[in-house]
Image (cartoon, rainbow, N blue to C red):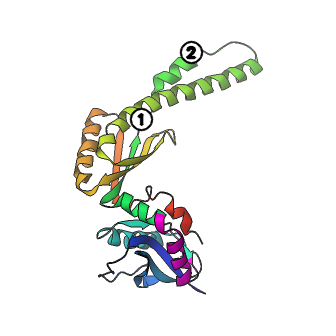
Amino acid sequence: MKGIYLYGIVGFPPALTDEIRGLGQTPVFLVPHGGLAALVGRSPFAPWPPNETHLTLHEAVVEKVMGSRPILPVRFNTLFRSGEAVIALLDKQSQPFRSALDRVAGKVELGLRVLWEPPRNAEALVDQEAGEGGPGTEYLNRRLRDERRQTSLRAAGEQLAQKVQARFRSLAVENWMQRLSTDRLLLSGAYLVERDRVDAFREGVAKARKEFSSLSFLLTGPWPPYHFVNGADDETRD
């Protein structure tokens, strides 16, 4: 059964000027409606295997279009049964889509991950509190030490993450943040940045590397604004 694969939502006009091929090497085209358009391609109505080839093709289509206009990227494997279903989506979500497009116009997303080595002095201080007693008491003491260790490390990590994060607030319009999602991942962030401020953001990361020399910084992008579409992406699941 044939379907329609959705890559993203854009404004309309203009029409696409370059030939773009997406999943299955099928041509990408626009389905316009009411000043908006869905960026789509023909596809079997079945999920594509989420391998590197297919994920890269999906991303390449979105990145190709984002170079010439604002785009609201949607999830990989967003499928519709027909063009009429796509138009119904554009009609139903017209205002949220317009607001989201205004929000990301002229901006890109940059990703930043910051790794740290948790301080060992916090563990040593907690370990010094080992108590005496039988096996049951020792077990409870060990559990208590583990909880105190985690609390101490998280407090230290939160404080450091806030200091790092503060260095980038003025360089981005908005940000999306996770702190301490793993033991070594101090900070994982997405930043909505004006296109002409991307170099300034990179310089900010370079300064942060010098200031926080014990941390490892990984900056990626520019990307489509996946984290800043105001929930519009949630409406594209068929």
Q: Relative to the observer, which residue lies in front, 17 or 150?
A: 17
Secondary structure at badge 1 equals helix
Kind of residue sitting beneath label 2: Gln
Q: Which percent across, then down, holds residue 101?
A: 39, 63
Give the crowd class for mark 1: few <14, some 14-19, many >=20 residues within 10 Å. Answer: some
Q: Which residues are magenta?
A: 80-95
Q: Residue at x 47, y 26 (%)?
A: 120
The answer to whether 23 appears left or right of 44 in the picture is left
Give the crowd class for mark 2: few <14, some 14-19, many >=20 residues within 10 Å. Answer: few
Kind of residue sitting beneath label 1: Ala
Query: Image quadrant of residue 204?
Result: top left
Residue 95 visible in image: yes
Secondary structure at badge 2 equals loop
| Mark 1 or 2, nearer chain start | 2
Q: Which percent across, then down, holds residue 117?
A: 43, 34
Query: Image quadrant of residue 150?
Result: top right
Q: Residue at x 41, y 41 (%)?
A: 115
Magenta-colored stretch includes residue 87: yes
Could you tell me which quadrant the N terminus lies in? bottom right
Q: Residue at x 29, y 68 (%)?
A: 67
Q: Is residue 110 above or below residue 4?
A: above
Name the residue that disc number 1 marks: 161
Q: Which percent across, then down, holds residue 163?
A: 37, 32
Could you tell me which quadrant the C terminus lies in? bottom right
Name the residue that disc number 2 marks: 128
Report the number of numbered marks: 2
Magenta-colored stretch includes residue 19: no
Q: Relative to the observer, which residue lies in front, 105 or 5?
A: 105
Q: Is residue 225 above or below residue 211?
A: below
Q: Which percent across, then down, holds residue 122?
A: 49, 23
